[in-house]
Amino acid sequence: MSVLEVAQLTIRDGNQSAFEADFANAHRYVQEAEGHLSSELRKSTDTDTNYVFLVEWQRLEDHIEVFAASPEFAAFQSVIGPHLAGEPSVEHYEKI
């Protein structure tokens, strides 16, 4: 059964356009990861510094053990990290 990762991101005010451009380039690190099924970034219509990154993984371990420990994750973080106003809030969900 697949698992949905929901990462809530708050971007530094004024960095939205740069974040979106950098994210578009860094997204490939996630898309090419073992166990990745689908992913998309969405921007809040209420607060322009808030985004949610939705990633569907085959297994929870594909995210928290395999991808999180990979050089690709470090590369992804190094690209988007400077735009973040704080640590992302991440939760995982399964279908019921």
Image: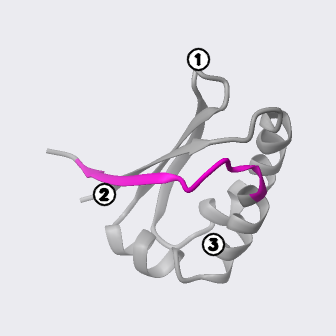
Range drawn in magenta = 82-94
Query: Which residue appears at 50% of the width and 50% of the height?
Result: 38
Query: Which residue appears at 42% of the width and 80% of the height?
Result: 65
Most foreground residue, 68 or 12: 12
Real-space Cα separation, disc 3 to disc 2, in angstroms: 20 Å
SS label for mark 1 = loop
Badge number at residue 45: 1
Based on the picture, tell me whether residue 41 belongs to the magenta stretch. no
Neighbor class of circle 2 (other Cα within 10 Å; few <14, some 14-19, many 20+) is: some
Q: Earlier in the sequence, mark 3 or mark 2?
A: 2
- Which residue is identified by label 3? 73
In the displayed image of the protein, which residue is found farthest to the left?
Answer: 96
Q: Do tag 3 and tag 2 residues touch (Cβ < 8 Å)?
A: no
Most foreground residue, 73 or 36: 73
Q: Earlier in the sequence, mark 2 or mark 1?
A: 2
Q: Where is residue 90 in the image (x, y as percent from the top left)?
A: 42, 54
The answer to whether 75 is drawn above or below residue 55 in the figure is below
Most foreground residue, 12 or 74: 12
Colour pattern of the rendering: one colour
- Which residue is identified by label 2? 2
SS label for mark 3 = helix
Residue 92 is left or right of residue 33, and the answer is: left
Residue 7 is left or right of residue 92, and the answer is: right
Based on the picture, tell me whether residue 88 belongs to the magenta stretch. yes
